[in-house]
Image: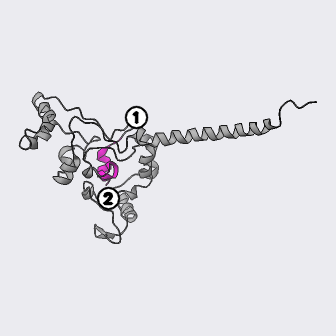
Amino acid sequence: MAQIFHRSTNTISRATIFGSVLIVAALFWAGDEIQRSPYVTYAGVVRPQPVPFSHQHHVAGLGIDCRYCHTSVETSKFAGIPPTKTCMNCHSQIWTNAALLEPVRESFRSNKSLLWTRVNDLPDFVYFDHSIHINKGVGCNTCHGPVDRMPLMYNDASLQMEWCLNCHRAPEKNLRPRDQVFNMRYEQPSSYKPLELDGKVFIDQDSLGLYLIKQYKLRTEHDITSCSTCHR
């Protein structure tokens, strides 16, 4: 019986099958990379705001504490966006005619809030409580990045679930004493710069973190990585 298909058909078939597998794998890889990229997460991307507020100027330059504007961060799930009156506490006295601040003055005159663009914005199906993290020793810049060095605000982290879980699985790597939570230039302890707390000296972050887990009564890793902890 004559051969129906050319001998090269087997080679072409194998190449097609393996090629399809590689193409599908490449598509999955590309989709995963896009999902983690700033195109999706907006990490490192400055958002437009009604007024170009500089945290670098107000925090690092003037030394204003986070809690002066974000008044509810220690007691509420929301850090709070300051009302225009908070801005005018200073700007009714300084830079009173600056064109850049006209939206602030207009907001104060009309009693209409400025429409700020939320930068660190989690999906609605995620439960997050600022007060819990603050009171358990998680510093502002652990999540928000070097805010005091940001002329314009952007989210420093991806804020994706894997990023949250990396911390929840090993919280000792990020905990600090409560009196250092709002210190934007806090440095983790090392043999070169030990940290003394409660009469104990710590020369590395892991030993400090494990100590603070007990002191601050953190729940177990199983609890804080449970789906129902963040998805309620």
Magenta: main secondary structure = helix
Q: Residue 200: x percent and y percent? A: 31, 70
Quarter location, residue 86: top left
Amino acid at circle 1: Phe
Residue 28 is one of the magenta-drawn residues: no
Asked whether 65 or 126 is in front, the reply is 65
Is residue 148 placed above or below 126 in the rendered structure?
below
Q: Residue 128: x percent and y percent? A: 35, 41
Is residue 134 placed above or below 125 in the rendered structure?
below
Q: How many marks?
A: 2
Asked whether 64 or 13 is in front, the reply is 13
User: Badge 2: few (under 14), some or many (20 or more) residues near its Cα, within 10 Å?
Assistant: many
Residue occupying image coordinates x 25% and y 36%: 49
Any part of residue 56 in sight: yes
Is residue 102 placed above or below 62 in the rendered structure?
above
Which of the numbered marks, if any, corresponds to residue 125?
A: 1
Amino acid at circle 2: Arg
Q: Read off the residue under disc 2.
A: 176
Q: Which residues are magenta?
A: 128-145
